[in-house]
Every structure is written in C-alpha cells, then in structure tokens.
Image (spheres, grey):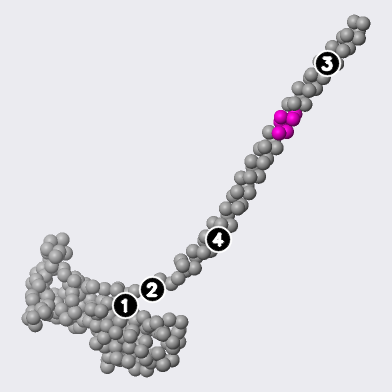
Amino acid sequence: MRLAAAFVTDMKLTMRMMSKAWHQQLSFSLICLALSACLWAQGSGSNSTAPSAQGDTTKTSPASSQPTPATADGKAHDDSFIIGADDVLAVNVWKETEISRSVPVRSDGKISLPLVGEVQASGHTPRQLEQEIAKRLQSYISEPEVTVIVQQINSQKFNVLGQVAKPGLYPLTNSPTVLDAIALAGGFRDFAKQKSIYVLRKNSDGGQSRLPFNYKDVVKGKNVEQNVKLQPGDTVVVP
C-alpha cells in the first residue's frame, strides 16, 4: 500500500511539472508569435507608404523641371533700356530653334532673322522688339512667343581723354567706375596729374557737371565716393 501511495504521489508531481513546463512553452510561443506579427506590421506599413512618397515626387517633378525664364542684367523686359548699334541680342522663339539665335545689331540699327527678315532694333526697347518680331511671325507660326535679351551692351560708351596710355571710346559694360576706366585706358602717362582727374557728365537740362576724382586719395581709401559708376556719354579727363 505504501508503495502504491508513493507511486501515485510521484505521478501527481510529474504531471504538475509537465503542466508547468507546457504552460511556459505555450507562453513563449505566444510571445514569439506576437513579436513576429508586430515586425510584419511595421514592414508592411513602411512598404505601403513608400509608393505614395514616390508618387508625390513623380507628381511634383514636372513642375520642378520647367525651364526658368532667362534674364540678362534685367534687360529682357526693361522698358527704360534702348537698344543701340553693336549691342548683341539673344532672340528666342519658343519651340523654334531654327529661328532662335544670338545676333548683333548692325551699324544701321537692324538685325536679320529667318522668316522675319530685317527688322529695326536700334531705338526700341527689348519688349517693343519682341512684339514686332512676334507680329511678323504670325503669318508662319500660331501665337509665337518671343523673348529678346540683351546679352552685351556695346552701344553705350564713355570717353577717356588726356594723359593715359590708350585714350578713346570704350563700351559701358559691367558698370565700370572711374578706376575701371583708367585701367581700361592702360593707366597713366608719366606726367599725368593724378589728383586733378574729373568726369564730365551731361545733365538732363543739357548742361554738364564736373565730378572731381583724386586718384591718390581714392587708392588710399579716402573720398571713395568720388569713384562713381560711369554713365553713357561720360568723359573721364586725365590732365
């Protein structure tokens, strides 16, 4: 009887241990299953959002790829700038590469373009020239879009006279100052009066202003306001 009771007791203890181990194994399996489900959900979420982001990029890329209108020193639609002889113009006709080109304004003030022929450019603003070219192209092109940009300003000039190496007429490009003008003219001659330089400038009333320029002071950082930017028709005099 004691042996049978001991056997029963051992069997109960064994069953309890097996039940506990089974519960532990079951709990571990459930935890692994839940963790796998979370990881799968995160991966699915990132994959589902990727196409939408890519789709947004695809939608916005055409707008970003549109060409930016070109400008050259603000002269494309500057109604105050008057085109003159020797200026270089970039004429662009939308989607018409055979007509679009860079052309110089001839001494007679005209330019030549395919289909357009000779057209007067000197004395007009870029906007006026655009309108004239577009008007002439209407017989060949439906609603032509024309842009005229001044690439080089050679018609506006200034003079350098007196005791410089190369006196003469110079194109007014890149907003030159008095110092720039002296450098373009090759610098001073031996007996130049560097403290007595002046600029002659035409006034709106037809008269002239005399702007003093002391080279010795300006190069030392004094009276730098005398180093003015030159305007069309200015004359730098080096006595």
Please tell me how many numbered marks the rendered image carries: 4
Quadrant for the N terminus in the image: top right
Q: Say which label, 4 or 2, has the lower sequence index.
A: 4
Q: Which of 170 and 125 lies nearest the eye of the viewer?
A: 125
Mark 1: which amino acid?
Ala
- The answer to which image quadrant residue 6 occupies is top right
Q: Which residue is mark 1?
A: 76
**Mark closer to the observer (1, 4):** 4
User: Which numbered disc covers residue 69?
Assistant: 2
Gap between marks 1 and 2 measured at Cα? 10 Å
Q: Regarding mark 1 in the picture, which secondary structure is present there?
A: loop
Q: Are marks 1 and 2 in contact (CB under 8 Å)?
A: yes
Q: The magenta stretch spans which residues?
A: 25-30
Please tell me whether residue 229 is drawn above or below residue 88 in the rendered image: above
Q: Is residue 193 visible?
A: no
Q: Regarding mark 3 in the picture, which secondary structure is present there?
A: helix
Q: Say which label, 1 or 4, has the lower sequence index.
A: 4
- The answer to which image quadrant residue 118 occupies is bottom left
Q: Which residue is mark 4?
A: 55
Gap between marks 1 and 4 measured at Cα? 37 Å
Q: Residue at x 23, y 78 (%)?
A: 80
Please tell me whether residue 61 is drawn above or below residue 141 in the rendered image: above
> Residue 224: x percent and y percent?
15, 64
Please tell me whether residue 44 is drawn above or below residue 192 in the rendered image: above
Mark 4: which amino acid?
Gly
